[in-house]
Amino acid sequence: MHGARRGQGEHKLRGVSARDRDGDAVRLHVVTGKGGTGKTTVASSLALALAAGGRTVLLVEVEGRQGVAQVFGSRPLPYAERPIAEAAEGGRVCALAADAEAALLEYLEMFYGMRRAGQVLTRFGAVDFATTIAPGMRDVLLTGKATEAVRRRSGDRRRGGREAGGGRYVYDAVVMDAPPTGRIAQFLNVNAEVAGLARVGPIRNHADKVMDTIRSAQTAVHFVTVLEEMPAQETLDGIAEIRSAGLNVGSLIVNMVRPPFFAEPVLQAVAEGSFDTGALVRGLKAAGLEDAEDTARGLAAEVGDHALRVAGESEIRERLAGVDRPHLELPLLGAGVGPGQLHDLAARLREQGL
Ligand SMILES: Nc1ncnc2c1ncn2[C@@H]1O[C@H](COP(=O)(O)OP(=O)(O)O)[C@@H](O)[C@H]1O
Ligand SMILES: [Mg+2]
């Protein structure tokens, strides 16, 4: 068709959004999801998965909750990039708890050599003032920190904010444990946020530069959900919002997946009301159980609840199936998630072709 081979990759996406992109080009992985669905857990596992095989990945937390430190079982993170875990086959994950005030001081120093002035401003509460009066300012500082890490190369002269170093990227990838689905589009769309704030000048330039990276094929937004109504709906809404802001959607990660306890025919029988409780009673009696009748009734009720849950989950799966992006799944880990389990989850992500 018109002899054009360009854009074929995009056609493969069946027109969902010409901007969504896969694979190796992505260096900034933004992880969002409804609160409690496992954003921090998934972002941490993703960082480990991406670091495997000798790469260096920065995991950035922007919500100031020290969730990353907690899940890695480390002490609270400072505003500094610190190694936090070794990944499989020689990789390394560094972590950073970004906070807007520290980022503003760093920004003033980088662009104006104004560290001391910044400290004076802090003492007078001017930083709080700046970031409170203009919430967009807070966001652009946080996203600015992450995008700077994405662009950073060894040998960069950091003063003046110029990226003059021609060396290798310092980080092979940056993973952001981002705000929840309800706020993600606004958070990333800093350009629109600071539009009313600064039309020209350094803030404008900074915002433009941040936006260049966020809008590029280097950035993808991954959505974490569980198989429940609300998180799934927020995911679908969030994906639509991210796309309409012109940003790339990465993968859909379904977390805390529970395997069905019973085989399909059993669940089917329950759904059709033809589950044979009598057979269960006979079986339990044959096994020598005393109160076989009561036990059977109790069990039948549990099987019923379970079948209902499984049916509900498959309905949600069907709705999510409409998302034409890679779907990855992580199991519900019975004993919770500690540092060791993060490695297991990372391995699962890699198995699924992350
Ligand atoms: N796959 C999983 N299996 C078991 N527990 C999980 C899993 N993913 C997350 N959790 C647990 O769920 C809770 C919420 O996870 P977290 O990553 O903090 O969510 P969020 O950052 O979205 O609020 C934590 O206690 C975490 O350990
Ligand atoms: Mg969290």
Image: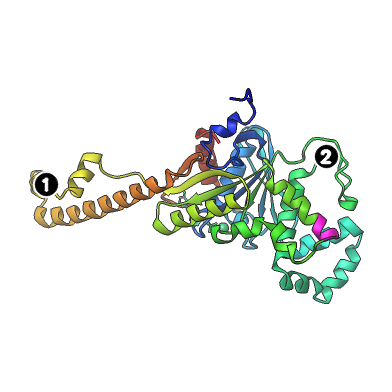
Q: Nearer the viewer, residue 84 or 138?
A: 138
Look at the image and give the residue range highlighted in magenta: 200-205
Residue 341, can we see it? yes
Q: Secondary structure at mark 1?
A: loop
* In this view, 353 is above or below 287: above
Q: Secondary structure at mark 2?
A: loop
Residue on which the image places disc 1 = 276
- Asked if residue 48 is among those painted magenta in the image, a careful observer would answer no
Residue 75, can we see it? no
Q: Is mark 2 within 8 Å of ligand 2?
A: no
What count of labels does the image hold? Answer: 2
Q: Amino acid at mark 1?
A: Asp
* In this view, 124 is above or below 299: below
* In this view, 22 is above or below 131: above
Q: Are marks 1 and 2 in contact (CB under 8 Å)?
A: no
Q: Which residue sits at x=85%, y=72%?
A: 121
Earlier residue among tags 1 and 2: 2
The quarter in which the C terminus is drawn is top right
- Asked if residue 203 is among those painted magenta in the image, a careful observer would answer yes
- Residue found farthest to the top: 3
Q: Can you give x and y, in whole percent of width and height, for residue 52 in the image?
A: 62, 35
Label 1: how many residues lie within 10 Å, few (<14), some (14-19) or many (20+)?
few
In the image: residue 18, left or right of residue 292: right
Q: Which residue sits at x=64%, y=25%?
A: 4
Q: Can you give x and y, in whole percent of width and height, for residue 30 in the image?
A: 62, 49
In the image: residue 331, left or right of residue 167: left
Residue on which the image places disc 2 = 154
- Residue found farthest to the front: 2
